[in-house]
Image (cartoon, rainbow, N blue to C red):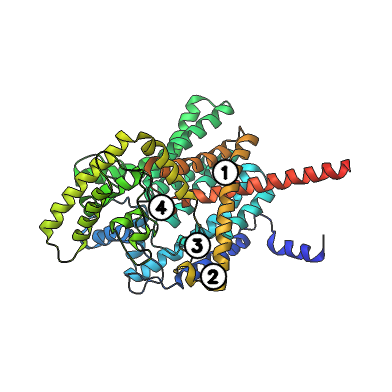
C-alpha cells in the first residue's frame, strides 16, 4: 500500500462509530447539492423563501394556515405528517422563515440518514466494506438528494424510511424493545407523510413475527412485541380517526381521498385514468406526457404536437376523432372567455365519455389494460435520466460542466438500477434466513410493484423512499462481483 493510499484511507475511512465525522461528510455533500438546487432560480410563490415549490406545496401548507387562522385543518385530504413540522415552526416564525427552516431541517435529517443507511448496511450484513461503500454511494447520489430543497414530503419520507429500517434492524440484532418502539414511531411518521406506505406495517409485523419464531419465542411474547411496535401508530392514528369523525361524521382511517375536491370536480381524474389505461403518462408536467396532447398544462417545454397518441388503443367506443373532440373541449374549458356554465357542461361530458372509453379498453382490450400498459408504465417509471430536477434547463442549454454532471449522474442512476436489482437476487440467495435483508428486499419490491403496476402512478419522486435501499443492494452486488472476480483471477493465475 502506497503512502498516498494510506493517507487517503486516514481521511475517508474512519471507524463507523465516529458519527461526527460521517454526518459532517454527509452534510458536505448534501449542502453542496442543496446550494446547487437553490441557485437554479426556480420561481416560487412564497416571498423570502429560498427553496423550491411545486404544485403540491400548497396542499401541505394551506391546511396549517387554515388551522392557525380559523382553527380548522382544511382542506384535509393530506394527512398531517408534513404539515405538523411546518405548524411547529409557524407557531414561532412567519411564513418565509418557517419554510426556510423546513428545508434546512430536511437537509440536516437527510444528512443523518446517509450515516444511518450505512450503519443499517453494516448491521444487516455484518460488513465494514459495505458500510463505507453504502455511505459514499448514497452521499454523492443526486436522485434522492435533489428534493431536499423542495417544500414537499419526499425528503422527510425518504429520511424517515431509512430511520425506520435502521431501528427495526437494530432490534433484530440486539432484541432491545426500545428500538422496536422507535421503529414503530418512525414508520408512523412515514405513513402520515405518505399513506400509501401503510402496508409496511403488515410487512414489518410478518417479518418480526417469523424472526421471533425462529428463536423459539412464545406466542404471548411475540404478541407483546407486535403491540409494542404498533403502539405509536395506534396512538397517533386514533387521534386522527377521532378528529375525522368529529369533522365528517364518518370513520376515515388514513385519508378520504388523494386529491382535492376541486381536482376531482374537474376532468383531470378521468383523463388521467384514461391515459393510464393504455400505458400513457398521466404526469402532465412531464414534457413527454400524453396528457399534453390534450392541451393539459402546457408550459413551453414541449409542444403538444410532439406528443402522440398510439394507434393501438382504439376500441368500438372511440377513435382519434373522438379524442380530438375531447381535446377541443378542454381547450374551450381552459379559455378565459368561456362561461362557467359552459365549462361545467363540457366537463360533465368529458368525464362521462372518458369513463366510457376507459371501460371499453378494459373490456375489449384486456391484454393492453392488464399486461401491456403496466409493463409500459414500469419501463417509464424506472428507465429515465435520473436527473429530473438537477438543472432548470433543457439539454441544449447546459454548459460543459452541467452536461458532464448530468451525464455522470444519469449513468450513476442507471448503473445503480441494474446493480440494485441484481443485488436483490444476490442477497435473497446468499441470506435466505436474514430477516433484516428480507425487510430491505420487501420494501424495494413493494415500491416497485405498487406505483407502476397497481396504482399506475409513475411520477419519478414516488420511488425516492425505496431508492436508498436500491443503492444499498447495488453495493451488495458490487462487493459480490469484486469478490467473485478476485477469486476468478486468483484461480486463473494459480492454474497458469
**Mark pair 1, 4: CA separation:** 20 Å
Residue at disc 2, secondary structure = helix
Q: Is residue 431 above or below residue 194?
A: above
N-term-proximal mark, 3 vs 1: 3
In x, y percent, where is residue 26?
57, 62
Q: Is residue 359 left or right of residue 312?
A: left
Q: Which residue is mark 4?
A: 459
Q: Does the residue at mark 3 contact the one at mark 1 (Cβ under 8 Å)?
A: no
Rendered-image quadrant of the C terminus: top right
Q: Which residue is mark 1?
A: 421
Asked whether the viewer can see residue 232, the reply is no
Residue at disc 3, secondary structure = helix
Q: Which residue is mark 2?
A: 402
In x, y percent, where is residue 43?
36, 71
Q: Quadrant of residue 124?
A: top right
N-term-proximal mark, 3 vs 2: 3
**Front one among 102 and 344:** 344
* Residue located 78% across and 43% down the image: 487
Q: Is residue 199 above or below residue 67?
A: above
N-term-proximal mark, 4 vs 2: 2
Q: Is residue 136 left or right of residue 363?
A: right
**Mark pair 4, 2: CA separation:** 24 Å
Asked whether the viewer can see residue 125, the reply is yes
Q: Which residue is mark 3?
A: 108
Q: Does the residue at mark 1 contact the one at mark 2 (Cβ under 8 Å)?
A: no
N-term-proximal mark, 1 vs 2: 2
Q: Which mark is residue 495?
A: none
Amino acid at each position: 500500500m502506497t503512502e498516498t493510499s494510506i493517507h487517503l484511507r486516514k481521511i475517508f475511512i474512519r471507524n463507523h462509530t465516529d458519527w461526527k465525522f460521517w454526518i459532517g461528510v454527509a452534510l458536505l455533500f448534501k449542502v453542496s447539492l442543496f446550494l446547487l438546487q437553490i441557485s437554479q432560480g426556480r420561481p416560487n410563490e412564497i416571498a423570502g423563501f429560498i427553496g423550491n415549490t411545486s404544485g403540491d406545496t400548497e396542499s401541505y401548507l394551506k391546511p396549517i394556515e387554515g388551522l392557525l387562522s380559523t382553527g380548522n385543518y382544511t382542506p384535509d385530504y393530506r394527512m398531517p405528517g408534513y404539515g405538523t413540522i411546518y405548524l411547529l415552526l409557524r407557531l414561532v416564525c412567519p411564513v418565509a422563515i418557517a419554510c426556510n427552516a423546513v428545508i434546512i431541517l430536511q437537509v440536516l435529517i437527510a444528512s443523518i440518514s446517509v450515516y444511518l443507511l450505512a450503519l443499517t448496511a453494516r448491521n444487516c450484513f455484518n460488513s465494514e466494506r459495505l458500510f463505507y461503500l453504502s455511505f459514499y454511494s448514497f452521499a454523492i447520489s443526486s436522485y434522492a438528494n435533489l428534493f431536499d430543497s423542495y417544500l414537499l414530503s419526499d425528503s422527510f419520507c425518504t429520511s424517515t424510511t431509512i430511520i425506520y429500517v435502521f431501528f427495526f434492524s437494530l432490534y433484530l440484532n440486539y432484541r432491545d424493545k426500545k428500538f422496536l418502539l422507535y421503529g414503530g414511531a418512525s414508520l408512523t411518521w412515514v405513513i402520515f407523510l405518505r399513506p400509501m406506505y401503510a402496508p409496511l406495517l403488515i410487512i414489518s409485523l410478518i417479518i418480526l413475527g417469523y424472526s421471533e419464531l425462529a428463536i423459539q419465542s412464545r406466542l404471548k411474547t411475540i404478541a407483546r412485541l407486535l403491540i409494542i411496535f404498533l403502539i405509536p401508530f395506534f396512538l397517533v392514528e386514533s387521534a386522527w380517526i377521532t378528529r375525522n369523525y368529529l369533522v365528517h361524521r364518518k370513520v376515515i382511517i388514513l385519508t378520504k381521498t388523494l386529491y382535492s375536491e376541486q381536482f376531482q370536480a374537474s376532468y383531470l381524474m378521468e383523463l388521467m385514468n384514461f391515459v393510464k389505461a393504455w400505458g400513457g403518462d398521466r404526469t402532465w408536467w412531464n414534457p413527454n406526457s400524453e396528457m399534453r396532447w390534450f392541451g393539459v398544462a402546457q408550459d413551453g417545454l414541449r409542444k403538444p404536437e410532439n406528443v402522440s397518441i398510439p394507434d393501438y388503443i382504439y376500441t368500438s367506443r372511440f377513435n382519434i376523432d373522438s379524442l380530438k373532440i375531447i381535446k377541443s373541449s378542454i381547450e374551450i374549458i381552459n379559455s378565459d372567455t368561456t362561461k362557467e356554465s359552459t365549462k361545467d357542461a363540457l366537463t360533465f361530458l368529458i368525464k362521462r365519455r372518458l369513463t366510457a372509453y376507459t371501460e371499453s379498453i378494459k373490456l375489449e382490450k384486456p391484454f393492453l389494460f392488464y399486461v401491456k400498459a403496466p409493463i409500459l408504465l414500469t419501463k417509464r417509471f424506472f428507465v429515465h435520466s435520473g436527473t429530473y430536477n438537477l438543472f432548470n434547463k433543457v439539454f441544449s442549454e447546459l454548459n460543459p460542466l452541467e452536461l458532464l454532471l448530468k451525464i455522470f449522474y444519469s449513468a450513476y442512476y442507471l448503473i445503480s438500477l441494474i446493480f440494485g436489482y441484481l443485488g436483490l437476487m444476490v442477497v435473497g440467495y446468499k441470506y435466505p434466513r436474514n430477516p433484516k435483508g428480507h425487510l430491505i428486499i420487501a420494501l424495494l419490491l413493494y415500491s416497485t410493484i405498487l406505483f407502476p403496476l397497481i396504482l399506475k402512478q409513475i411520477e419519478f419522486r414516488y420511488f425516492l423512499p425505496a431508492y436508498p435501499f436500491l443503492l444499498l443492494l447495488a453495493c451488495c452486488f458490487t462487493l459480490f462481483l469484486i469478490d467473485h472476480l478476485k477469486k476468478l483471477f486468483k484461480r486463473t493465475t494459480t492454474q497458469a
